[in-house]
Image (tube, grey):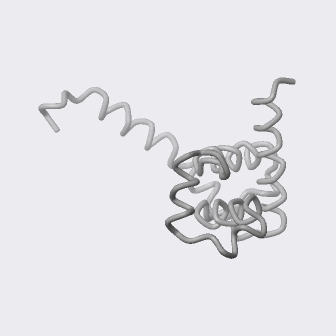
Amino acid sequence: MNNVLKDLKDIGEKVEKLLILFPKTRDNDNLLVSYYWAYQLGDKFENLTCKDFFRIYAEGKEVICADTITRARRKVQEKCPALRGNKYSHRKNNETIVRTHITDLHLLKFDEI
């Protein structure tokens, strides 16, 4: 398995653990990402300034992108129904509506917006 696939699998496993340990993260991506970063940064997290965090986030070296974490959450919840939050079915029910709106937006010309 190449390193990228291994990294993605590791991220998914860590996200799954957080969803199990902290059920509120199942419906709150901001909370999930915060917990993931705190876990990822370890002891460094306690003394990290906001400015330092922004720097390391922008560099993409020490913390994983929030989008990657939330994507992993969606995949885990897709495969493990027990880890789905209360909002999961609501989001799934609205999926068709959102897709339709996005399609409609693509059909508009920029000068019509």
**Residue at point 63%, 67% (across, down):** 31
Q: Residue furthest right?
A: 1
In the picture, measured across the screen, residue 23 lies left or right of residue 64, that is: right
In the displayed structure, would residue 59 be above or below residue 103? below
Residue in the foreground of this view, choosing between 13 and 46: 46
Residue 104 image point, x, y percent: 31, 33
Residue 98 image point, x, y percent: 44, 43
Q: Residue furthest left?
A: 111
Residue in the foreground of this view, choosing between 30 and 41: 41
Quarter holding residue 48: bottom right
Quarter holding residue 5: top right
In the picture, measured across the screen, residue 11 lies left or right of residue 90, that is: right
In the displayed structure, would residue 95 be above or below residue 47? above
Q: How many marks?
A: 0
In the picture, measured across the screen, residue 96 lies left or right of residue 43, that is: left
Residue 109 image point, x, y percent: 19, 27
In the picture, measured across the screen, residue 18 lies left or right of residue 109, that is: right
Residue 36 image point, x, y percent: 71, 60
**Residue at point 82%, 49% (across, down):** 80
Residue in the foreground of this view, choosing between 15 and 38: 38
**Residue at point 40%, 36% (across, down):** 100
Q: Quadrant of the N terminus?
A: top right
Residue in the foreground of this view, choosing between 54 and 2: 54
**Residue at point 51%, 49% (across, down):** 58
Q: Quadrant of the C terminus?
A: top left
In the displayed structure, would residue 37 be above or below residue 106? below
